[in-house]
Amino acid sequence: MSKTNHAADARKKDAAEDLFLEQMSHQREVDAQQGEDDGTLAFAPNIDFDKFKPSRSSLAARKRKNILMTALIGVAFLVALIPLISVLWTTLVNGARRLNWDFLSHNMTNVIGGMPTASGGHGGVLHAIIGTLEITLGAMVISIPIGIMCAVFLTEYSKGGRLASVIRVLVDVMSGIPSIVAGLFAFSMFTIIGGPGTLNGFEGSVALSLLMIPTVVKTTEEMLRIVPNDLREASLALGVTKQRTITKIILRTSMSGIISGCILAIARVIGETAPLLMTAGFIVSTNFNLFSGEMTTLPVYVYQEYSKYKAHCPEGASASCVASIPMERAWSAALVLIIIVLILNIIGRLAARALSVKSK
Amino acid sequence: MGQRIDIQHLNVYYGDFLAVEDVNLNIDANKVTAFIGPSGCGKSTVLRTLDRMHEITPGAHVTGEVLLEGQNLYAKDVDPVAVRRDVGMVFQRPNPFPTMSIRQNVLAGVTLNNKRISKSDADDLVEWALRGANLWNEVKDRLDKPGIGLSGGQQQRLCIARAVAVHPKVLLMDEPCSALDPISTLAVEDLINELKKDYTIVIVTHNMQQAARIADYTAFFNLKAVGQPGHLEYFADTTTMFNNPQNEEAERYVSGRFG
């Protein structure tokens, strides 16, 4: 619905109300007259309406309260900004030091202590970037179709039945699952399928999809719910089948909101560490195969580097051996992760804008 | 050409609640038939049973028969989707598809069903439908602009164009002018007068002047009390209905001395 439409509706409503009030007051006069004619008292108790008027002091108090609340809200906003800016700034300052092309284009093979590698750098995150992108993509492929179809069932097919409320409760419960439990689930599932100790990227995708599905279901359901019923009726009345009404009208109309919801869900899981430690493992070399062999993701890389704390530099090593390199790598990897999330967000926003409802 | 509708012993239920009781009504082809009556009397409900749109409300069902040119719409092997292709509907609030351009809106009935349509066929259909809805001259230069960018009255005529583009036999209108200003209302009323050459038109309206202006026949629905089922109180040609109704309730209603 366009804004202008709302405004027009509101105006119509106002006009209707005015008319109604006019008629009411007219009716009251008529009633009063009839009452006098009959010689009986009409139902009109004596009311001193001045008593209910806002007094001058209460108006002044309201003004003061308004200033106070405005100030409070402004301060709360600033307080909320402090951690955000602080985190971004710290990551930027610490991460920029080692963030260069060498860092982005190399993995951690042949990195010995704090010594520089053959390429002149100190190892990099190429394998972790590939792992993060592939595992997250796998999680998207699993959870977005399931989540959207689940939401379609809830809004379009369930007719408010018992099954729908059970599903809603389960989705709520699912959104509260600690991520480590999702990791345990995926791990034990793949132990059953592939034998004990199976670790691969897809296992991580399964774990992450458990965390994504509830978010996708909830946001999509909200978006489908706000599609006006008028559109469903308009489509059905044209002799369009229900299936095509859903895919071509309802999902299409809410598409930009659904995309925003999916981006939100991705942002929630792309930074997960614990379940991926259990399921995708940790390696230093680049693995492109999502379905076989361990994979490293950026958050896991950050954790691993951070837990090394200091690299070993042999005595008498040249100045190019950097003992503090693990922490520096961790910061840079964190910055890379933030940039990836930012890029995803921008892509999502552009897609949402391209698909949004326009009235011009 | 339009087709006639015969309603026989129609009861409409929402779950267990009987909403409308025993309606018997013959609607002539290529005429405008208006449904009038107080709120809650079931005139919109009856209208929606004519293209089985009431079925999208959970629990709604009917007993009795609705015959479209002799064919029972409620026979076992009748597909409601097919019924809605023969019986088009225009709603109270203009509801063009917000993601579609004017042109796409007109073609929606064809393209949404996955029918391929060549560009020249589509151009012809768009122009034919928009001319039929008296909208062509206003929008011919901006067919690719969004449908919701039009004014309310234009949107409603766009919805009528969309409905006639699937070439139905009957056009149902559920208070099509109640959200429009008087000028747009006039445009839509003129349009209804022209459309009856090709379609049978059934219109629900709260506006009795409107019924008197455009309808050939008028059906007056009433209900005995709130919570009681609505029923068809009186059916007559419009002149009789508004000048000399042979029914006390109808007479009180059309003369504004109701209740």
Image (cartoon, rainbow, N blue to C red):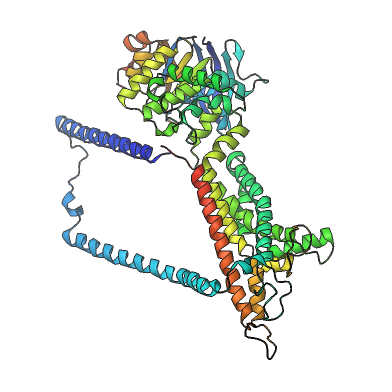
Front-most of residues B142 and B188: B142
Looking at the rendered image, the quarter that the C terminus of chain B falls into is top left
Question: In the figure, is residue A142 to the left or right of A53?
Answer: right
Front-most of residues B66 and B21: B66
Query: Which residue is rendered at x = 52% and y = 45% of the image?
Result: A256
Q: Is residue B172 above or below residue A359?
A: above
Query: Which residue is rendered at x = 58% and y = 14% of the image?
Result: B67
Residue A323 occupies quadrant:
bottom right
Q: Residue B16: horizontal and vertical position, in percent?
A: 57, 32
Q: Residue A80: horizontal and vertical position, in percent?
A: 43, 68
Residue furthest right as drawn: A195
Residue A24 occupies quadrant:
top left
Front-most of residues A325 and A22: A325
Question: In the figure, is residue B109 to the left or right of B153?
Answer: right
Residue A194 occupies quadrant:
bottom right
Query: Which residue is rendered at x = 68% and y = 57% of the image?
Result: A134
Q: Residue B145: horizontal and vertical position, in percent?
A: 44, 32
Q: Residue B99: horizontal and vertical position, in percent?
A: 49, 36
Query: Which residue is rendered at x = 40% and y = 18% of the image?
Result: B134
Residue B43 visible here: no
Residue B49 visible here: yes
Q: Is residue A341 above or below residue B8?
A: below
